[in-house]
Structure formats: structure tokens, C-alpha cells
Amino acid sequence: MPIVTGYEDTPGGHDALVLGALLTRLTGLGAVVATVYPADARGLAAVANDPRWIPRAQKVARARFARARAIIGEGWGETEPVFAALGPGSVALVLTEYADEVGAAVLVVGSTGHGLLGRLSPGRTVQRLLPMARCPVAIAPRGYRHTLSTGMTVVTVAYDGSPESDRAAAVAVHLASRTGAALRFVTVAETDDDVAAAQATVHKGIASAPVEIDALTDVVVGPVARVLADLPERTDVLVVGSRGYRLMRRVLLGGVAGVLVRTARYPVVVVPGHS
């Protein structure tokens, strides 16, 4: 089960590369760096009939891979990454199909939209990819390559007691156990009147955590997506279920870039609601 990083030689691609290398090094899983061949402007049919396209595409792929090696250096640790040139086709579709084919543990992408440093601003590829992905998708915030710390100390899971958040918790547990990080369960109470119920929910979540993992709980009051995007306690990565909180389906899978994915200060791992 490798960690697959979707890479292009852009700032967003570099952010994804750094996050993918960090996850690879800390988890000890395999690494695949995948780039999608550029499609000809005239369409895929023209590409297939143009004998010049393949050499050009391969040249682009080789240049991207050389740049990736230069950026990361020894960042993958002892793991030697596999470089895969894919396509041509829709980047989102090609990446998700490839992730399925190799049984990816996580598919890592960069936020390709415009946004402030350290904030997610998902571009078209990310928005198209999330509804199709069958494995967890990790999105690196813009500028992550400049703000990354050397390790991972806290994995936070957004927990609301739903089956979707239980799936997210399972992924967070696996990530925490692999990296040695503490695991924080966070439940959001939208009003002060909801705090008691939120406390009961978050304690249900932590009861499912293995005893060998350091686990913490937090109840935070406020609008769900806004609170999760800017948690007051340290978070190195936030794991959420794609259909967990009320409105989360719209936030993550709809045409509107929601507050959480648009403004999170840290990488967000979106766990799909289907297998």
C-alpha cells in the first residue's frame, strides 16, 4: 500500500511532494510519485495519432522527476520512490484510477488554487478528484513546503459519532500508530447548549482508540468548518470524513469550495464515505 503523490512542477506540486515524502518517511510505506502526461491541445484523439507526442510527453515527465529528486533529496528516508508517468487524460481521473490500481494507502495532492500562504485553496483538479477517490486524499496547503516541521506530533480527527467519522478515526489511528504521533479527537459544538452532547460524543470516539496510542479529546465551540480549519491546539494533520459533519458533503464534494478546505492551516486528509 504505497503513498501516491500526484506531482507536477508547480508550487502546488512541490507542496504535495513535500507532504508525500514526509508521510512516506514517517510511516515507512512505499512511495510513488506520479505525473500525468500533458494532453495535446487538440484533444486525446489527436494525441494518439501524433507520433511526436510520446517523446515530448516523456521529456516533460523526465524533467518533472529530475526536479522532484532535487527538491526532496533524502526526504524520503530509506525508501526509494517509484516514478510513474501516466495518461494522457484528466489529471483527477487518471490519478484516482492509478491509486485504485496500486492500492494506495493515501493519495497526496497540492492545493492548486490561489490562496494565502499556509492556506488551502483547492483548484479544479482537487475539486474533481475528491468525489472520485476511493482512498484517503491528503491535501497540502499552499506554501506547505516552506512551513513544514521535521516531524508529526499530533494527528487530529474530526469526530461526530457518525459512521463516516468512525472511518476517519480508523485512518487517523493508523497514521498515528505509524508515525508515533499523539491522536486528538475533536468534536465541534455549534453552540454552548451543544457542549454536553459534544463531550459525550468525543468520549465515545476516544474509547475506540488503542491503549498504546496517546489519545486526547477536545470540544470546541463555533461554526464547524471554520473551527476545524483553525483549531486552537497544535495539529499537524486533520483527518475528516467526506460525509461526516452536517453540510460536509457540500463543503468537500460540491461545486463550492467550503470553508474547511479553503482555509485550513494544515494538511487535510479526506476519507471517502465509500469503499
Image: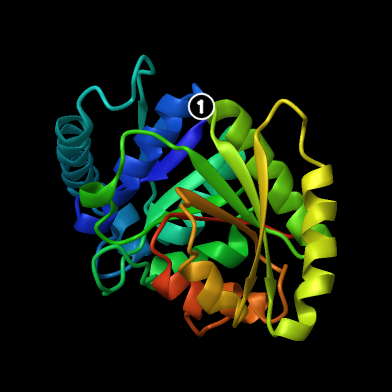
**Is residue 5 or residue 240 the one in the foreground?**
240
The answer to whether 160 appears left or right of 157 in the picture is: right
Residue 54 drawn at (x, y percent): 24, 44
The answer to whether 271 appears left or right of 166 in the picture is: left
Compared to 189, does 166 lie above or below? above
Residue 108 drawn at (x, y percent): 44, 47
- Residue drawn 24% across the image and 58% down it: 143
Compared to 4, does 162 lie above or below? below
- Residue drawn 29% across the image and 59% down it: 39
- Residue drawn 85% across the image and 53% down it: 204
Residue 148 drawn at (x, y percent): 29, 45
Q: Quadrant of the N terminus?
A: top right
Compared to 147, does 245 lie above or below? below
By what rule are the colours in the image chosen?
A: rainbow
**Is residue 86 or residue 175 the one in the foreground?**
175
**Mark 1 packing: few (<14 Cα in 10 Å), some, or many (20+)?**
some
Where residue 271 sits, quadrant-wise, is: bottom right
Residue 258 drawn at (x, y percent): 51, 80
| Residue at the spot of label 1 | 27
* Residue 235 appears in view: yes
At numbered mark 1, what does the secondary structure look like: helix, strand or loop?
helix
Tag 1: amino acid: Thr
The answer to whether 7 appears left or right of 196 in the picture is: left
* Residue 8 appears in view: no
- Residue drawn 54% across the image and 34% down it: 181
**Is residue 176 or residue 89 the one in the foreground?**
176
